[in-house]
Amino acid sequence: MNDTTNTFKKAPKRKGDKGRRVTMSPEAKQAYADLIQHRQDQEETYKRHLPSDAKGR
């Protein structure tokens, strides 16, 4: 029971996950940026027409 050499060993270090890289053409990047902007505009328009929660019930 006096074998403490294996009790407090350091765990081996893990390798970090590498991020994926995607190569896109400038046209594809612009199309993606336009899509994001369009979705943000739709969400803003949708929220604008919702009733506000600030009113007393």
Image (cartoon, grey):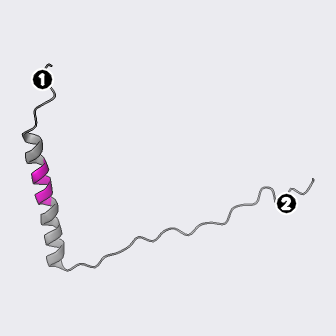
Q: Residue furthest top?
A: 56
Of labels 1 and 2, earlier in sequence is: 2
Q: Is 51 drawn above or below residue 9 in the view shown?
A: above
Residue type pointed to by label 1: Lys
Residue type pointed to by label 2: Thr
SS at mark 2 in the image? loop
Q: CA distance from mark 1 to mark 2?
A: 68 Å
Rendered residue at 8%/40% (across/down): 48
Whether residues under marks 1 and 2 lie with C-beta atoms below 8 angstroms apart, the answer is no
Q: Residue 33: percent from the left, percent from the top?
A: 16, 65
Rendered residue at 13%/59% (across/down): 37
Q: Magenta region, mostly helix, strand or loop?
A: helix
10 horizontally vs 29: left or right: right
Q: What span is in magenta? A: 37-43
The image quarter in which residue 13 lies: bottom right
Q: Which mark is residue 27?
A: none
Residue bearing the label numbered 1: 55
Q: Residue 25: percent from the left, percent from the top?
A: 19, 80
Residue 41 sits inside the magenta stretch:
yes
Other residues around mark 2 within 10 Å, as few (<14) / some (14–19) / many (≥20): few
Q: Is 2 drawn above or below residue 25 in the view shown?
A: above
Residue 27 sits inside the magenta stretch:
no
Give the quarter of the figure containing the C terminus: top left
Q: Residue 35: percent from the left, percent from the top?
A: 14, 64
Q: Is 33 drawn above or below residue 52 in the view shown?
A: below
Rendered residue at 38%/73% (across/down): 20
Q: Residue furthest right?
A: 1
| Labels in figure, total | 2
Rendered residue at 23%/78% (across/down): 24
Q: Which mark is residue 5?
A: 2
Which-is-in-front pick, marks 1 and 2? 1
